[in-house]
Image (spheres, grey):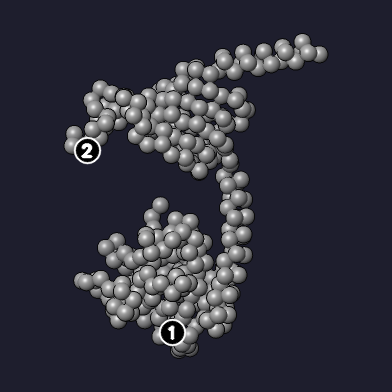
Amino acid sequence: MKKILFMLVLITSIAFESTAQQKLKTKNGLEYTVLSTKLSPKKGKIGDFVKVSVALKNYKDSVIFQRNIEKEAIRDAQKGDITEVLQYMAEGDSISCFVSADTLFKDEPPQQRPAFFPIGTMMKYYIKLFNIKTAAEIKLEEEAKNAKAKMAETKIIQEYALKNKLKLLVTPSGLHYIITKKNPTGVQPKVQNVHVNYTGQLLNGNIFDTSIKETAQKSGKYTEGRPYEPIKFMLGKSQVIKGWDEGIALMRTGERATFLIPSFLAYGERGAGADIPANSILRFDVELMQVELEQNIAPIKEENASPIKEKKK
């Protein structure tokens, strides 16, 4: 029995060594070397997501950057894209890949070429793949995570509402709101341009943005030269955070409302600048000033961007 076990260990060891340090090529000709492998049968494919660590060194073996990436998509990368190698890796694999700096920076002006990648040198990538998940697995994880966050943040919002005597309504998505000034004869917007006055604050009372000059001055958020006026955007086109798109659609012109927006309908884990930390529940006091007629619809211009806009990924 011991002899059989020994032979199994020996065979496994030989298989491991025969794969490690092997030089291979991707379909686009990118050369890479398998430094180590656990011979996992689980390999990535286009559409999957991987957790990896990536290190980049220059010709002096100086580390230019090193970071862990929790969720990197495996896609059909173009020639010269280092991420192409991900679809050739299995869980537990570590690889190295050297790419000519001249090739990478051939279309860049000389002044934009980093000094640590001089002419004739190589960029050295080292990648370790920890795990692979399908898009369906990622979706289930995110749904479970959102459900947990929704429960926790709902409790915080309810406690805040009780403390501040706010009788809030709640939508299926988790937006909490109250119409503080009603106007039954006002126009309820659809997919069209709207003009909204607003003040946004964290639950601790810190105001992070407002369209109202007096409020900005009192809160110490006044910016010289900024036009303090209602923000204009097209409702229902994801030009603002989800909580705004949903909340403004519930209002009529002339109405005021208070929104308590959980983080998953706002800026989530990434936050927004220095004033809105990650996972922040936001309070917005808003007034729907105007709804434009359909013939006046125009896409929002980038220069009119506001902190309440959804950040580009």
Mark 2 or 1: the one toward you: 2
Residue 282, position as x, y percentages in the image: 46, 69
Q: Which residue is mark 1?
A: 255
Q: Is residue 109 above or below residue 167?
A: above
- The local secondary structure at tag 2 comes to helix
- Could you tell me which residue is drawn at 26 percent across and 31 percent down? 116
- Could you tell me which residue is drawn at 50 percent across and 17 percent down? 22
The quadrant of the image that shows the N terminus is top right
Q: Which residue is mark 2?
A: 112
| Residue type, label 1 | Glu
Residue 51, position as x, y percentages in the image: 52, 39
| Residue type, label 2 | Gln
- Could you tell me which residue is drawn at 56 percent across and 72 percent down? 157
Q: Is residue 230 left or right of residue 172?
A: left
Residue 303, position as x, y percentages in the image: 26, 63
Q: Residues within 10 Å of mark 2 (few under 14, many from 20)?
A: few
Q: Residues within 10 Å of mark 1 (few under 14, many from 20)?
A: many
Q: Are marks 2 and 1 in contact (CB under 8 Å)?
A: no
- The local secondary structure at tag 1 comes to loop
Give the residue furthest to the right.
1
Residue 95, position as x, y percentages in the image: 47, 26
- Could you tell me which residue is drawn at 78 percent across and 13 percent down? 2
Camera-side residue of 97 and 65? 65
